[in-house]
């Protein structure tokens, strides 16, 4: 693909567009939804879009795949929140939300590591993959976003 920082920015932005688009689509869908099936659909679409992004030979196809993955993430987020609100006892939702949403930080770390490896072509391209970050809470302070970073 060799699209550089602009291509990476486009793919990241398109993923975000999908995340916003999916809940808007759910608002238009008036029928009652089965939350568990929506969660599974979201996980499937997110994984499928990520897989197709890796297989895409050109930036346009990768962008469409990221849009699909972003929509999957949007479906997953909405249904995840709904399931927690429907099933967790009234005194525990804060703890459950905190536990569930913490995994998104780890997923973000993995995504950044994968992009670093793809962008720089070296397995040691990410300081997080090298184990230099001891705490997940320190991620923004420890992550170097510059495209020239080589580990």
Image: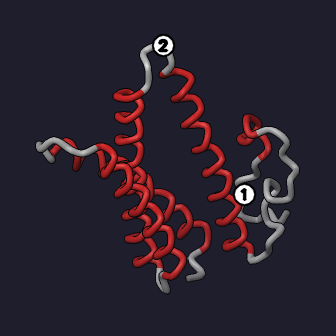
Quarter of the image with the N terminus in it: bottom right
Circles 1 and 2 in contact, beta carbons < 8 Å: no
- In this view of the protein, can residue 71 be seen by the observer? no
Residue at the spot x=79%, y=75% of the render? 122
**Percent position (x, y) of residue 66?**
44, 65
Quadrant for residue 101, please give it: top right
Real-space CA distance between mark 1 and mark 2, rounded to the nearest whole angstrom: 43 Å
Residue 12 located left or right of residue 82: right
**Which residue is at the front of the view, 150 or 74?**
74
The residue at which mark 2 appears reads as 91
**Is 146 situated above or below 80?**
below
- 36 and 26: which is toward the camera: 36
How is colour applied across the structure in the image?
secondary structure
Disc 1, SS: loop
Q: Which of these two is toward me, 80 or 122?
A: 80
Q: Write the residue at 51% across / 29% down.
A: 97
Where residue 84 appears, x then y in whole percent?
Answer: 42, 31
Q: Quadrant of residue 127?
A: bottom right
- Image coordinates of residue 91 in percent, x first then y, are 48, 13
Q: Nearer the viewer, mark 1 or mark 2?
A: 2
Q: Residues within 10 Å of mark 2 (few under 14, many from 20)?
A: few
| Percent coordinates x, y for residue 149 in the rendering | 79, 62
Q: Please give the name of the residue rendered at 67% of the width and 52% of the height, measured from the top-left corner.
A: 109
What residue appears at the point 37 percent right and 71 percent down from the top-left corner? 64
Q: Which residue is mark 1?
A: 146
Where disc 2 sits, the SS reads loop
């Amino acid at each position: 693909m060799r699209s550089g920082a602009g291509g990476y920015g486009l793919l990241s932005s398109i993923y975000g567009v999908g995340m916003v688009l999916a809940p808007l689509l759910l608002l238009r869908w008036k029928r009652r939804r089965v939350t568990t099936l929506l969660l599974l659909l979201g996980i499937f679409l997110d994984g499928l879009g990520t897989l197709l992004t890796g297989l895409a030979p050109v930036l346009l196809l990768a962008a469409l795949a990221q849009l699909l993955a972003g929509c999957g993430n949007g479906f997953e987020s909405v249904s995840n929140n709904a399931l927690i609100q429907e099933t967790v006892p009234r005194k525990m939702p804060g703890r459950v939300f905190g536990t569930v949403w913490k995994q998104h930080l780890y997923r973000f770390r993995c995504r950044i590591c994968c992009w670093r490896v793809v962008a720089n072509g070296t397995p040691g391209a990410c300081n997080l993959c090298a184990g230099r970050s001891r705490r997940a809470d320190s991620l923004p302070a420890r992550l170097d976003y510059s495209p020239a970073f080589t580990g």
